[in-house]
Image (spheres, rainbow, N blue to C red):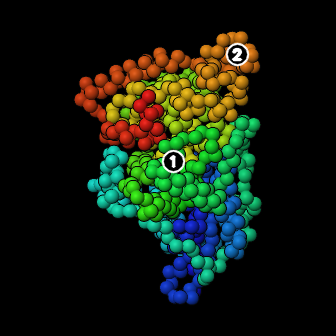
Amino acid sequence: MTSNNILWFRHGLRLHDNPSLLEALRNDGGGQSESVRLYPIFIFDGESAGTKLVGYNRMKFLMESLDDLDRQLKAIGGQLYIFRGNAVNVMRRLFEELNIKKLCYEQDCEPIWKERDDQIVNLCRMMDVKCVEKVSHTLWDPEQVIATNGGIPPLTYQMFLHTVNIIGEPPRPVGAPSFEFVEFGRLPSILSTELKLFQRAPVPEDFGIYYEGNADIARQRWTGGEAKALELLGRRLKQEEEAFREGYYLPTQARPDFLAPPSSMSAALRFGCLSVRMFYWCVHDLFARVQANNQLKHPGGHHITGQLIWREYFYTMSVHNPHYAVMELNPICLNIPWYEAKDDSLDRWKEGRTGFPLIDAAMRQLMAEGWLHHILRNITATFLTRGGLWISWEAGVQHFLKYLLDADWSVCAGNWMWVSSSAFEKLLDSSSCTSPVALARRLDPKGEYVKRYLPELEKFPALYVHEPWKAPPELQEQYGCVIGKDYPAPMVNLAEVNKCNANKMNAIRQKLLDQGGSTPAHCRPSDMDEVRQFFWLPEDVAAES
């Protein structure tokens, strides 16, 4: 007997290491010859895959990922059905018309998806459809981590590591799918019309989303999809291997290069084009092979994939906290009286018009390409909040969620809370801030990165490129860029605002302590190694900070 099953793609946009796909390919009848009729679907419901707040680059990456899936499925006789509408309404009609027996999907652990998924589970119960959720977007099931920790999220990163060590290593990737006893279902024409099935691969313009960046400065072309992700993984593993052979790890952190083609896998992981478990185990297995041939042994452990562990930690912290991405009602976040920007301060930050070249270059790169190195994310976030403009981290979260290719709700908000000293660190104890000028001189000494994204500063020499306002007026004229006219003057005096903001934080901190330390449960101390790893700062930059 044939079982009609739906595989609902949401974030896990791949065929490799896809437990929900394997489940959807299985006929629960039990017989060897029992076949499956599979319906792979994706639903644009205004929420799925982070499309509630989305800009052009991220939407384009998502659509390329769906197109890649569709091509792979067509190569084996199927296709990806892409709908637009309410997920419950779409599922109900599919269940009714297609006699669906089983619905399978990957877990979306963040609380912003809970209402949708609860409604789907209830619909399956009412219509006698088996509903199967599989965990593969995270290394560990966040619910298991919380249960292992006594029913509450681990309060610090170190506690998180202790908890997952109790659980054990994350599962290895599951095997490749077999389509031997599978046929792909075809939709009746009535459903295609009624459920707003896309007849061709959609593009961002179909949703009224248009490019807002400067195409002339865009250098990095990001392409979505599993095929591209696996190609990039091969390149990244070569980089990891070189680092291991030279005796270090986390190469993008240890030797940051703003000009080199990025080797980050973060966008592919965010949309599930690459399995996080495959990435984790590829790196750890590679480390073990390199170590086996090294005379000088280095200790292994989670630290060699530290970025992935931070991702897990932030996911776990958000699972039971629907207010995680805002300040009010957020139990882990300090309520800091940020400046309510009624002038154009926030817009100048967003548009790269602050007058500080490193900040402006980064913000323009974000709009043009949809990606920033983690160090640049941290310095622009620090400048918006405690290091410069004293504007709430919530505004930064919204901007990054819209324009960063790899931004997801949990990790993005977690990063912003920490950078702004609102959570995950000692109580308002990060009063000193990295100077964007000092950081630029250290990591972009010739100003090559700045000039790439701020072509108006192209003729400024290294002496002035990071502080162009210090160039004499006659030289500004000679360089073809007069500060205050062709490029903005600094919008704040950094030394003054740093001192002012540090005083504000110290005053708030003292008031909280005087009141008996009524601090959120998750503002906890971190050691300096942990801070340095989080900010991806080389040791010498961390010392300067």
Q: Position of residue 318 (x, y in %)?
A: 42, 48
Q: Residues within 10 Å of mark 2 (few under 14, many from 20)?
A: many
Viewer-proximal residue among 388 and 297: 297
Q: Is residue 50 visible?
A: no
Viewer-proximal residue among 122 and 372: 372
Q: Position of residue 336 (x, y in %)?
A: 40, 28
Task: Tell me which amino acid carries mark 1.
Answer: Pro
Q: Position of residue 65 (x, y in %)?
A: 65, 57
Which residue is pictured at 71% across the width and 70% down the height? 74
Q: Please, is residue 180 above or below residue 319 in the view?
A: below
Residue at image mark 1: 251
Mark-to-mark CA distance, 1 and 2: 38 Å
Which residue is pictured at 43% across the width and 59% down the height? 294
Query: Is 106 left, or right, of 258 in this rendering?
Result: left
Classify the position of the C terminus by image quarter: top left
Q: Secondary structure at mark 2?
A: helix
Residue 36, quarter of the rendered image:
bottom right
Q: Position of residue 82 (x, y in %)?
A: 67, 61
Residue at image mark 2: 476
Residue 95, quarter of the rendered image:
bottom right
- Quick check: marks 1 and 2 in contact, CB under 8 Å? no
Task: Tell me which amino acid carries mark 2.
Answer: Gln
Circle number at residue 361: none
Which residue is pictured at 61% across the width and 78% down the height? 179
